[in-house]
Amino acid sequence: MKKLIGSLVLIFALFLLVAAHFLSSLILSPTSLIPIDEREIFSKTRFSEFSLPEPEAIRFQNGTLRLRGWYFKHSNKQNCGMILLHGQGRSKSQMLSYAPIFWKLGCSLFLYDARAHGESDGTNTTYGFYEKMDLERAVEYFSEIDNTPEDRIGIFGLDFGGATALQFADGQFEYGFVIADSSYRDMRSWVEETFVDRFTEASRIVTPLSLSISELRGDFLVNDVSPANTAKLITQPVLILAPSENETKKTDSEMIFTNIKTKSKQIVLYAMPKEDCKPLQSPSNEYETTITNFFKEFRLNK
């Protein structure tokens, strides 16, 4: 009987290890969780459909990692530049729907694929741990080619992109302001909630081990990935956005907003459009007005 119990325990332990390794692959390669082929979608789309000119294809380095993107130089440029960061498992194409908001405000634009996404190099996603260092280099490179001071460059990001922007804005780097839409409060809670939604509550048993394996494979620390903690160090203007219908994103965004110490902050909860399933859907007029008013209040393009 003892041998049988021992064998069953060993089998269960091996099952947990295999399951944890499988889940760690999903954590480090979130593109596998997104059933949208943006390359196919964008092949039928033109920049003119977003009232944008043809961009310059750009490549920049962070160490040995090469990142690829688009640079839109504004001919009537105001004193501002915008870096747009896409969401988890997506690519720079996702940000074309949002780019016209900032183009109308007279900002040159810089869109790029995060590491391990789209056309950029890299094999692992670290939820902002290394991505914030890529963003540091993006701000420097954008400032060089656009002749815009780094402290006049704003950063707009969706979920993963917003989390990266908030972790970047911890006072170590030069930047102008941050707009973060639907950022998670920390990596650990995001992974746990995502796996519960995808695999049921039983996934909670193996998630801690899968996160530990992810740390080893990706060479980073999960507990250090926390926009909610970094928010306490932000001193520049911040706009936090979140869909009012999504309780998790709403709660996470409110927690982040509460932690931000600067008085130059705003939070706005918005209603999601009914046709939200469209991958390149344009944001609502109310959404655009919120951002425009944020620019006006803090004179961000003057």
Image: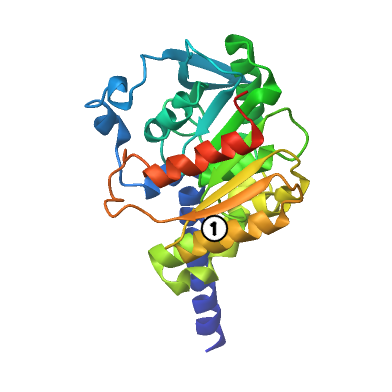
Asked whether, in this view, residue 51 is left or right of residue 289, the answer is left
Q: Residues within 10 Å of mark 1 (few under 14, many from 20)?
A: some
Residue beneath the point at 25% across and 25% down: 43
Give the x, y percent position of residue 133.
66, 31
Residue depicted at 47% across the width and 37% down the height: 86
Q: Residue at x 53, y 83 (%)?
A: 5
From this view, report whether residue 281 is shown above or below residue 142: below
Q: Nearer the viewer, residue 236 or 115?
A: 236
User: Considering only vertical position in the picture, is 192 above or below 90?
Assistant: below
Q: Is residue 63 visible?
A: no
Residue sitting farthest toward the bottom: 1
Q: Looking at the image, is 139 positioned above or below residue 29? A: above
**Residue at the spot of label 1:** 190
User: Viewed as shown, does residue 239 lie left or right of 198?
Assistant: right
Residue 234, image x, y percentages: 74, 43
User: Residue 147: x percent and y percent?
Assistant: 63, 10
The number of numbered badges drawn on the structure is 1
Vertically, is 93 above or below 276?
above
Front-most of residues 200 and 298: 298
* Residue 150 appears in the rendering: yes
The picture quadrant where one finds residue 170 is top right
Q: Disc 1 marks which amino acid?
A: Trp
Give residue 188's position: percent from left, percent from top: 60, 58
Which residue occupies the foreground of this view, 112 or 273?
Answer: 273
Q: Residue furthest left?
A: 44
At numbered mark 1, what does the secondary structure look like: helix, strand or loop?
A: helix
The quadrant of the rendering that contains the C terminus is top right
Q: How is the image coloured?
A: rainbow
Q: Residue at x 54, y 76 (%)?
A: 9
